Image: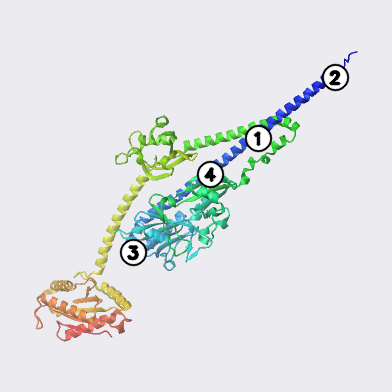
Amino acid sequence: MPNTLAPPAIKIAALYRAAVREFIFIFAAGALLIVAVALGAIRLDSRTQTARMETRDAMQVELASKLIGHDFETAASDLRMLAKTPDMLDFITSEKASDRDRLAENFRVFAGEAKLYDQVLFLDAKGMEVVRANYDNRAAVIVPHGQLQDKSGRYFFRDAFKLAAGQIYVSPLDLNIEHERIELPYKPMIRFGTPVFDRRGQKKGVILLNYFGSALLDNFKETFKGGDQRTMLLNRDGYWLSSPNPGDEWGFMLGNPRTFGKGLPKEWKAISSADHGSIRTGNGLFTFMTVYPLLPGQSSATGSPLPREPSTRPLEHNEYYWKIVSHRPPASFSHERLNGHPVVLAILTGSLLLWFLLSGYLALSRASRKRWQATLAESENRLREISVTLAEGVYVIDENGRVVFTNPEAQKELGYSGAELLGQNAHALFHYQKPDGTPYPEEACEIGRVVLSGQTYRAVEETFWRKDGTLLPVAVSSSPIMRDGQVAGSVVAFHDITGRKLAQQMLKQSHIETERINTRLREVNSELEHISQSDWLTGVANRRHLDAYLEKEWRSAARAGRSLSLIMIDIDHFKAYNDHYGHQGGDDCLKVVAGALSSTLGRPDDLLARYGGEEFAVVLPDTPLEGALHIAESLRSGVEAMNIPHAKSSVSKQVTVSLGVAAMVPDVRDAIPAVLVAAADKALYQAKAQGRNRVCASEPD
């Protein structure tokens, strides 16, 4: 009897086995698919997050670089303005106390308004502070004369004083030193200096701006605020100027040998050998950029951490730089490890969860991809909006100098549409000619040479030409675009400086008009001073000027141990002359005698003055008694030789003079000038008593 139950049982068993095999196959296939998708999603997510980190770090580093360059431009502009103010030129030309006071007030107002400079100083040619205004984050004050310091030994004075007119010295960023010690609390400082020349072209000293380095460093830190990376600013030797660990900062000033390069030699080798880029090592991701803040016409040197040590050597433009470094430690890349994705680990814990979580995981992966795509699209749109709304013109050229992108501002300034610019050689289209009409060869174009040199080019003034043939003066910056270590083109940003040039011309005209007015004022003051010091009748010095001059020369002679003589002169029988010829004749006689006396005196420091009535006096600096007697005899004989007719007199037929001479002696150097006047008067009376028309001498009591 056949077994009718076997076949169904066998079928069921076979079906079961087939179902198990199918289940195992499907399960295995599903598990492999889930694992493959999970690993792929993890890699995509990791790359996206890493790329976002690198892009954000690079943008922040570049922004920090631009802010530093802007700070240097501001300081250089302020320095040039102060060096050319009329108050500065007036003081270094005249060296008058009143002009110095006006300059000091100018410095104080400027420091209080700018709020960027710890000190605004003028140092003379010997390095001594002459004018200084300090700013302490509250108010600006003028430093009293007794508190001014000798800066002749500081490297920044020596380096700045060597420069020619118009050149600017920029010191390294270091700590301020006051009274031969590092100032506490630490005060980071950059010194901008330029020599100043008087109106005769003589170098008179140096004007210095002590720029608050802390402001620059605070702006630097603010740029990276809110990020989870560690940011550093290093000098060219790898010392920290700004560090997450304040104990690392200013090692070169404090004798701390620790540097970034000593702690991370592999990373420093890559950072110090390139201008910008990024490097990923076991210590994390390092994104960096080199800042070359010096502008055309600026120079620097190595400086010195010691108060009286000079700079080791000057620095070329490309040797003065800082390194901006953004560091993300390995912990920032936890998304690249499998244990950083707990959802995927849960999916992989069992076959049942794999099936249930498959759709959820796929949906999650798809949503995640869409989210990252939306983020990237938003970033692209934001960059596009920035370029469209940017107030500066921007265009991009490829390695052949052809335009591949322009923003609306560039099209507006140049007068071309985007289609007219696209694909054109930028230099040949709008940069082909200099302002004077001479051709500008493309091989000499610094903007285009960026794609060859790989170095950023900046110029405060360049010339573009609009479509209608009109000139467009611009300030321009051209930065290289790097791809795989090669220059693939450059980004050029420019803005119209027509308004600035017009303002400069107006300022120059204002300075010219101010100088004309000042010149006339000086002439008027000189005329007034001459009138106040001259006798109205004879034109020689008056009594007031005589007294002041004698007082000054007396003190100078007493202080230096030099000789000083005085001659008193009286016209003989002048009353009889005046009675005979009248007052007009007497006045004419006084003028002729004054002319005869003045023509006899040959030295510029000798002073002839009308003492009163028919009396004159002569002050003879650096002249002993013997020399004064010789000069007095020459004066007497000079008047006698003129043979001026005299009134009827039994004494003489022509006008003669009597002279009394006195000289300073050591015993009376501590006395007053009146002693010398009294002695000369005494000698004059002796000459008259002995018959007139003669010279007598007397020593002061």
- Identify the residue position indicated by label 2 in the image: 9
Q: CA distance from mark 1 to mark 4?
A: 26 Å
Hey, what amino acid is under mark 4?
Ser
Find residue 39 and name its label. 1
Image quadrant of residue 408?
A: top left
Label 1 – label 2 distance at C-alpha: 44 Å
* Front residue of this view, candidates 565 and 47: 47
Q: Note whether residue 221 is visible.
A: no
Q: How was this image coloured?
A: rainbow
Of the 4 image quadrants, the one containing the N terminus is top right
Relative to residue 316, is residue 619 depicted above or below? below
Dot 1 surroundings within 10 Å: few (below 14), some, or many (20 or more)?
Answer: some
Cα distance, mark 2 to mark 3?
123 Å
Indicate which label's residue lies in the foreground, 1 or 2.
Answer: 2
Which disc, if any, is residue 95? 3
Counting residues from the start of the chain, the first of labels 1 and 3 encountered is 1
* SS label for mark 1: helix
SS class, disc 4 = strand
The picture places residue 357, in percent across and down from the top left corner, at 71, 32
Give the mark nearer the N terminus: 1 vs 4: 1
- Amino acid type assigned to the residue bearing label 3 in the image: Glu
Tell me if residue 633 comes above or below residue 466 in the rendering. below
- The Cα atoms of the two marked residues, 1 and 3, are separated by 80 Å
- Judging depth in this view, the residue of 74 and 645 nearest the camera is 74
Residue under pointer 4 = 278
